[in-house]
Image (tube, grey):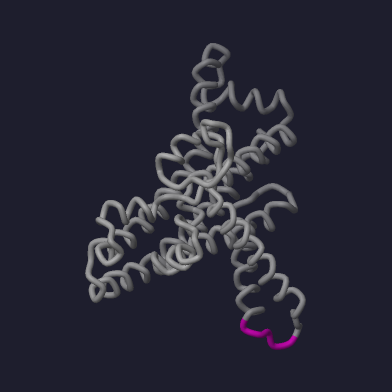
Amino acid sequence: MASEQGQTASEYIQHHLTHLTYGRYPDGHWGFAHSVEDIRAMGFWSVNVDTLSWSIGLGILFLFLFRIAARSVTSGVPGAWQNCVETIVGFVDTSVKESFHGKNDLIAPLSLTIFVWIFLMNLMDLVPVDFVPHAFYLAGVHYMKIVPTTDPNITFGMSLSVFFLIIYYSLKVKGISGFAAELTLQPFNSKLMIPANFLLEGIGLIVKPISLSLRLFGNLYAGELIFILIAALMPFWAQWTLSVPWALLHILIITIQAFVFMMLTIVYLSMAHEDH
């Protein structure tokens, strides 16, 4: 509870929404930010160390866990972990087969990586809001956010990667002239309508990475904020009463958001492979 830590509810919420930031101060020296004002002063020349650390760490965890399953695979009765991994791989493989209509060996492993990595990053939202930050505070680290997908830098980074793949495969499959024709000759197949077509198709193309990133960020940020509000405004006995039901519902949300990001990636790349 915020009052037990000597903070007002507003200070408690702001503290939990602030990243561990390393950047360049206006006077030219580099260091960690000690306040929100320091972060604002750093501006563009800063990185959210907690976001990068947790996202990279969870990515390594994903590779490690799946490597364990791959090394211990058996043709007999599978173990619990092998069965879990096979279920996930089968689910992703089915989704790709049903939604992707081209031929590309990258799509299935890319979809698997997106789904599991985003799920793991989302899953960190279920860790009690004070557990990890307080442990780091005792170690001398003032700020620590552990849910990477509540940082728009991560969600935009992933969506931009998908966007670059869309452009790359659109040019590879259709060629420069085919991709240009797709942007200028539809939905209205008339040379007089080229400016209008280009405006409509250009907006539709640019909106894809924006919608991908903001959907994931918005849902996870809202979920995290609810947990923080419960911890900041409620007495200890009421926190578990409210947090547990919301956490059970949030399990569904974090899974759906990982699935939606994966499915939209598959659909967008499938569209990039369609040559009219």
Q: Residue at x 75, y 83 (%)?
A: 74
How many labels were placed on the picture? 0
Locate residue 173, reporting x and y percent.
73, 36
Which quarter of the picture shows residue 13? bottom left
Residue stretch rendered in magenta on the structure = 76-80
Taking 268 as reference, is 199 above or below it?
above
Instruction: Relative to 186, say whether 3 is above or below.
Output: below
Q: Residue furthest top?
A: 192
Residue 22 sits in quarter = top right
Is residue 8 toward the left or the right of residue 90 in the image? left
User: Picture coordinates of residue 83 (x, y %)?
Assistant: 63, 79
The N terminus: image quadrant: bottom left
Q: What residue sits 64% from the left and 23% below the top?
A: 181
Is 79 in front, or is 237? 237
Q: Main secondary structure of the magenta part?
A: loop
Q: Is residue 272 left or right of residue 224?
A: right
User: Quick check: 55 above or below 175?
Assistant: below
Depicted 220 relative to depicted 273: above or below: below
Residue drawn at x 65%, y 62% as measured from the top left: 93
Q: Tell me, yes or no, whether the highlighted magenta stretch contains residue 180.
A: no
At 75% from the left and 53% from the top, the residue drawn is 105
The C terminus, quarter of image: top right
Q: Nearer the viewer, residue 102 or 23?
A: 23
Q: Is residue 112 visible?
A: no
